[in-house]
Amino acid sequence: MTPAISLLVAAAVVLPAVMGAASLLLLRHRLDTSRLVSLGSCLTLVGIAAALVIHASGGTTESYALGNWRAPFGIVLVLDRLSAMMLLLTAALATAVMTYAVATGMDRKGWHFHPLFQFQLLGLNGAFLTGDLFNLFVFFEVLLIASYGLMLHGQGPQRLKAGVKYVVINLVGSTLFLVGVGLLYGVTGTLNMADLAVRVAAAPVGDQGLIAASALVLTVVFALKAALAPLHFWLPGTYSATTGAVAALFAIMTKVGAYAIIRTGTLIFGAEAGAAAFVAGPWMLPAAIATTFIGFIGLFAARGLRDMAAWSVVGSMGVLLSAVAVFTAEAMGPALYYMLHSTLAGAALFLVADLIAKRRGVHVDALTHAPRFCQAGVLSGLFFLAAIGIVGLPPLSGFVGKLLILDGVREAPAAAWIWGSILITTLIGVLAFARAGSRLFWKSSELEGEIPTRVLRGRVVGVGAAAALVAALGLLAVFGGPVTAYTEATATQLFAPQGYVEAVLGKNAGGRR
Amino acid sequence: MTMELLVASAIAVLTAAGVYLVLRGRTFPVVLGLAFLSYAINLFLFAMGRLVIDRPPIYDKAAEAYTDPLPQALVLTAIVIAFGMTAFVVVLALRTFLETGVDHVDGHEDAEDAS
């Protein structure tokens, strides 16, 4: 590993940590400066992540030993195609969301928005980079603690009520995480993920049952974060109760769960793992198909646009995880492409819903008839595009993603179920969003008058941030060739974990016990 | 053998109490349940390094055998995180009660409370 790359890998974790601490300690009362620091940090992270993606696309896996303690004894940060891709996705999303938050002034609705945001990024980047299972737990806690603060930002009774549920369910999840980690440590005596891969593969038959149990416990924890049915109940209430910008950022939070499932499922509990090999797949697949249906049918139960956005996040997690649960390289590549798409599409929908809610006075985002509001033309266009994106109609990337998934799972035994669920729910989604759109914009346009709005902050930049996310969906479709080439190479790399193990433990690691 | 049985049953009892309390309707039992669960997990993690008596965890010239130091470090981390989270959830529950007047986790008043 060259010094420049190791510097960049470390900077992806250190930068948000330093910026968060600085804006907490030094810039508490200087909103303008902390805004600049926050935006600067996000933009720098985009640059760092882009450089890392370019480096990782060469196919090498890099390992950075923290404090120079050699793996498996020390903690390592590992950069491969998947983690580089997730870093770039996080940084791009964070920049759009931060721009939106600053432009609309929602960051002044409560204390410490900027430090919490940076700590959230610290947790996310750390979780994507770490090569140590217990360290993954710690970064999960960091991102969760920051997310509790962000979720409650601005407060209000409704938000507090949803916050209690969100915090309690995640604390129970963290406890279960420790059970899984403890079991695995008790059997193998290591926590380094590469070393775990080696030792799980070499585990005696008697221990394989325990390893499979810990694989399933860990999957339950990650499925809770990923909102896999029946563990999805916390999501709609939480996401629709928090502010639009935070909900948009949280679009990446469910993907952390999916990332952890993919990482542990291919590396530790991969093809070599004996009884634990892909043990989660058969359990996840029916749950994921159910999630797809629940999410898209839930769109009809929604009373407002923010509810709809939350349910569509659930539905798209179902689509994503049904492709992941197949656990083949052919299905994983499309799943990763769809992960990029669904994060951006979900975030775009949350921002559009928030923009509309701010302009409709007492009607907020409820699906009711109401007179015209300001910027209705632009926002109806954005809503139309975001809905097309999240449902998966051409020409945006949702269509490409779903098509690739349909193609990728063709060989799977449950292909008929996945095909059926994706095609039927797409139709359901189209109906639900058409109904919402016609109520909000079409039929409302017949009513007389216009809703008077207060002077709105960030009329242009706020709409611009949402538009940028929608435009990203278009770019994902236009540059579908290079992006899918990258995700397919990522999938191939994931299903050949030997490279990861060698990068962390050195050559000849496979023969070591 | 007795020690293993004792530790295992202690973990089981703590977990059972924790799960029962977490499923209660009001926030205070839920907070207590979370605390019980974290105690159970701390013991569990500790036991995952195997139960060894009278052995040093780190290097000692006179020692013939060692106990595993890593689970102790893990438990320490887990205690710190669980402690911080318990404090946070207590404040959050209190704040929610003060602002909404309801201390139920689902935010709805009991029928008996209302009457």
Image (tube, coloured by chain):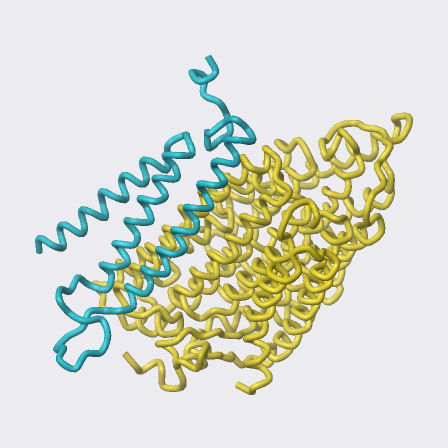
Looking at the image, residue A167 lies above or below residue A140: above
Which of B55 and A468 lies nearest the eye of the viewer?
A: B55
Chain A painted colour: yellow
Pinpoint residue B79: horizontal percent, then vertical percent.
35, 55
Residue furthest left in the image: B1
Residue furthest top in the image: B115
Left or right, A429 with reference to A322 = right
Pinpoint residue A213: horizontal percent, then vertical percent.
31, 55
Identity of the residue drawn at 29% across and 49% down: B39
Pinpoint residue A403: horizontal percent, then vertical percent.
64, 56
- Which chain corresponds to the colour cyan? B
Which of A98 and A255 lies nearest the eye of the viewer?
A: A98
Quadrant for the N terminus of chain B in the image: bottom left
Q: Is residue A331 visible?
A: no
Left or right, A13 with reference to B9 = right
Looking at the image, residue A447 lies above or below residue A322: above
Looking at the image, residue A16 lies above or below residue A232: below
Which of A487 and A444 lies nearest the eye of the viewer?
A: A444
Identity of the residue drawn at 36% across and 53% down: A217
